[in-house]
Amino acid sequence: MPANLPPDYFAAEKRYREARTPKEKIEALREMLAVMPKHKGTEHLQGDLKRRIARHLEEAKKKPKIGKAAAPDYIEKEGAGQLALVGLPNSGKSSILAAVTNAHPQVADYPFSTFRPLAGMMPYQDIQIQLVDLPPISEEYTESWVYNIIRCADLAVLVVDLGASQPEEQVLSLVRMLERVNIRLSKSSGERADGLSVITKKAVVVGNKADAGGAKFRADRLVESRGIREGFAIQFISAKTGANLGEMKEFFFNGLEILRIYTKAPGKKSDLEKPYILPKGSTVLDVAKAIHKDFVERFRFARIWGSEKYDGQMVQRDHRVEDGDVIEIHI
């Protein structure tokens, strides 16, 4: 049963997000609880509001600390790349994070259950990719730090709900709202923005809840939408059942446009434990620079092992490397 929350509820929720003291937060939460309809569809939300009120009451009893915490507008990057999960309320971003990482977000079947950014590491073969779950993008209110995290991420993942109507309109809504804050989404990471104040961010689309009734029909509509099909790569999954999660991991890796390059010292075995992560289009000289900056000036030649190559083939500094190549630098 849908919650059907009234406008007064969202106004009170905005005051809660902007509140700086436990007292202000408690007042806003109590108003949210008072104005919301009481029925089976809001039972979980009622319980969540009551738990938050109790938590802030405990905070109010403690001695206030000097100073103010900074806004969480930056998540330190870890692993091979950072992905920002971007979506409308109740799109299933937190479910994706919980399904493929060891993070434990609050997963609920009502909107706005995510209030703070939460990062988790997703294993993909021999590397880790960082996923950041964000509060939903909303016409009513979105805190500015959410956009800052999207700007800094390596890839924006637009999560849409295949259990809801018009997933293509969900994508277009996200595109419009991000454009208002000068974030232009693109299918390619190589595109440049028109103005100095505009950030171009590569994005992909993930259709979640593929197990929902009518999801196949809505997924087909999304693929048939020319503007979205030509604008973004699309992957369909179900975080609930686990369908296509393995394909999604590869989808994310390809979306980052990165290479895993392994190295070996002359006369020794290859080091296949920890690859160097480089952008697609990198050369042997870029690999040498990643190993040690002094190798660039002292570089003589390299030998390379990889698919469709002669083992130990001699190559020069401008040779482009491919994912999985093993490089032996001679200086």
Image (tube, helix red, strand yellow):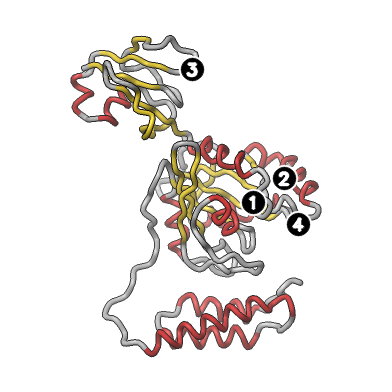
Q: Any mark on residue 122, and which? A: none
Residue 110, visible in the rendered structure: yes
From the viewer's perspective, is the residue at label 3 or at label 1 nearer?
3
Classify 10 Å Cα crowding around label 3: few (below 14), some (14-19), many (20 and above): few
Q: Any mark on residue 171, and which? A: 1
Q: Nearer the viewer, residue 223 or 49?
A: 49
Residue under label 3 = 307
* Marks 3/4: CA–CA distance: 45 Å
Residue under label 2 = 222
Q: Residue at 42% across / 57% down in the picture?
A: 148
Circles 1 and 4: CB atoms closer than 8 Å: no
* Viewport quadrant of the C terminus: top left
Q: Kindly state the secondary structure of the residue where label 1 is placed.
A: helix
Q: Residue at 45% across / 12% down in the picture?
A: 309
Q: Amino acid at mark 3?
A: Ser
Q: Any mark on residue 165, and which? A: 4
Circles 2 and 1: CB atoms closer than 8 Å: yes
From the viewer's perspective, is the residue at label 3 or at label 4 nearer?
3
Counting from the top left corner in percent of width and height, residue 215 is at 77, 51
Q: Earlier in the sequence, mark 3 or mark 1?
A: 1
Q: Is residue 176 left or right of residue 3?
A: left
